Protein backbone atom coordinates (compact mmCIF):
# COMPACT_ATOMS: atom_id res chain seq x y z
CA UNK A 1 0.00 0.00 0.00
CA UNK A 2 2.91 2.35 0.61
CA UNK A 3 4.08 1.85 -2.94
CA UNK A 4 0.55 2.60 -4.20
CA UNK A 5 0.52 5.83 -2.19
CA UNK A 6 3.92 6.79 -3.62
CA UNK A 7 2.48 6.33 -7.13
CA UNK A 8 -0.78 8.14 -6.33
CA UNK A 9 0.90 11.30 -5.02
CA UNK A 10 2.64 12.32 -8.26
CA UNK A 11 -0.44 11.23 -10.23
CA UNK A 12 -2.57 13.50 -8.05
CA UNK A 13 -0.13 16.37 -8.54
CA UNK A 14 -0.32 15.94 -12.32
CA UNK A 15 -4.12 15.76 -12.17
CA UNK A 16 -4.28 18.89 -10.03
CA UNK A 17 -1.86 20.87 -12.17
CA UNK A 18 -3.06 19.94 -15.64
CA UNK A 19 -6.65 18.88 -14.91
CA UNK A 20 -6.07 15.51 -16.57
CA UNK A 21 -3.40 12.84 -16.85
CA UNK A 22 -3.45 11.41 -13.35
CA UNK A 23 -4.81 8.11 -14.62
CA UNK A 24 -2.13 7.96 -17.32
CA UNK A 25 0.49 7.88 -14.61
CA UNK A 26 -1.25 5.71 -12.04
CA UNK A 27 -2.99 2.99 -14.08
CA UNK A 28 0.17 1.23 -15.32
CA UNK A 29 1.64 1.08 -11.83
CA UNK A 30 -1.64 0.06 -10.21
CA UNK A 31 -2.06 -2.66 -12.86
CA UNK A 32 1.34 -4.05 -11.90
CA UNK A 33 0.61 -3.83 -8.16
CA UNK A 34 -3.02 -5.02 -8.06
CA UNK A 35 -3.67 -6.62 -11.45
CA UNK A 36 -5.14 -4.88 -14.49
CA UNK A 37 -8.83 -5.19 -13.56
CA UNK A 38 -8.52 -4.12 -9.93
CA UNK A 39 -5.93 -1.44 -10.66
CA UNK A 40 -8.06 0.14 -13.38
CA UNK A 41 -11.20 -0.10 -11.24
CA UNK A 42 -9.49 1.62 -8.32
CA UNK A 43 -8.27 4.49 -10.49
CA UNK A 44 -11.63 4.79 -12.23
CA UNK A 45 -13.56 5.06 -8.98
CA UNK A 46 -11.15 7.60 -7.48
CA UNK A 47 -11.11 9.74 -10.64
CA UNK A 48 -14.90 9.61 -10.86
CA UNK A 49 -15.25 10.83 -7.28
CA UNK A 50 -12.72 13.62 -7.85
CA UNK A 51 -14.44 14.81 -11.03
CA UNK A 52 -17.88 14.57 -9.39
CA UNK A 53 -16.87 17.31 -6.95
CA UNK A 54 -16.10 19.62 -9.88
CA UNK A 55 -19.32 18.90 -11.79
CA UNK A 56 -21.74 21.38 -10.10
CA UNK A 57 -19.53 24.39 -10.79
CA UNK A 58 -18.82 23.29 -14.35
CA UNK A 59 -22.54 22.68 -14.93
CA UNK A 60 -23.33 26.23 -13.82
CA UNK A 61 -20.65 27.82 -16.04
CA UNK A 62 -21.23 25.74 -19.17
CA UNK A 63 -22.05 27.41 -22.47
CA UNK A 64 -25.05 25.21 -23.23
CA UNK A 65 -25.39 26.36 -26.82
CA UNK A 66 -21.90 25.10 -27.58
CA UNK A 67 -22.30 21.95 -25.46
CA UNK A 68 -25.50 21.02 -27.30
CA UNK A 69 -23.84 21.52 -30.67
CA UNK A 70 -20.83 19.38 -29.74
CA UNK A 71 -22.97 16.68 -28.11
CA UNK A 72 -25.14 16.46 -31.22
CA UNK A 73 -22.12 16.15 -33.48
CA UNK A 74 -20.61 13.53 -31.20
CA UNK A 75 -23.84 11.52 -31.09
CA UNK A 76 -24.17 11.51 -34.86
CA UNK A 77 -20.53 10.46 -35.23
CA UNK A 78 -21.00 7.68 -32.69
CA UNK A 79 -24.14 6.48 -34.45
CA UNK A 80 -22.38 6.38 -37.80
CA UNK A 81 -19.43 4.51 -36.28
CA UNK A 82 -21.83 2.02 -34.70
CA UNK A 83 -23.59 1.48 -38.00
CA UNK A 84 -20.25 0.97 -39.75
CA UNK A 85 -18.76 -1.49 -37.26
CA UNK A 86 -21.88 -3.42 -36.19
CA UNK A 87 -21.75 -6.50 -38.47
CA UNK A 88 -25.48 -6.95 -39.32
CA UNK A 89 -25.83 -3.30 -40.35
CA UNK A 90 -22.50 -3.40 -42.17
CA UNK A 91 -23.64 -6.42 -44.18
CA UNK A 92 -26.87 -4.66 -45.13
CA UNK A 93 -25.16 -1.44 -46.17
CA UNK A 94 -22.27 -3.04 -48.05
CA UNK A 95 -24.29 -3.52 -51.24
CA UNK A 96 -25.64 0.02 -51.20
CA UNK A 97 -22.19 1.49 -50.65
CA UNK A 98 -20.65 -0.58 -53.43
CA UNK A 99 -23.38 0.34 -55.90
CA UNK A 100 -23.10 4.06 -55.08
CA UNK A 101 -19.30 3.98 -55.44
CA UNK A 102 -19.50 2.18 -58.77
CA UNK A 103 -21.46 5.12 -60.17
CA UNK A 104 -18.91 7.76 -59.15
CA UNK A 105 -16.76 7.64 -62.32
CA UNK A 106 -19.84 8.38 -64.44
CA UNK A 107 -20.86 11.53 -62.55
Image (cartoon, rainbow, N blue to C red):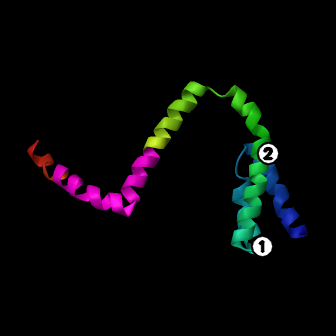
Snapshot quadrant of residue 23? bottom right
Horizontal relation, residue 2 to residue 31: left or right: right
Horizontal relation, residue 5 to residue 83: left or right: right
Observer-nearest residue: 53 or 86? 86
Q: Is residue 66 magenta?
A: no
Assign a secondary structure to mark 1.
Answer: helix
Snapshot quadrant of residue 31? bottom right
Q: Is residue 93 magenta?
A: yes
- Start and end of the magenta stretch? 77-100
Q: Which mark is residue 16?
A: 2
Pinpoint residue 29: horizontal percent, then vertical percent.
75, 68
Q: Which residue is mark 1?
A: 34
Q: Outermost residue toward the right?
A: 2
Front position among marks 2 and 1: 1
Pinpoint residue 5: horizontal percent, then vertical percent.
87, 63
Q: Quadrant of the C terminus?
A: top left
Amino acid sequence: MTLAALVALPAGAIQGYAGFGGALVSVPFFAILFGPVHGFAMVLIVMFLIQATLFPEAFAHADWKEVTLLAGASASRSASAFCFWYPPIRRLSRGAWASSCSRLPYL
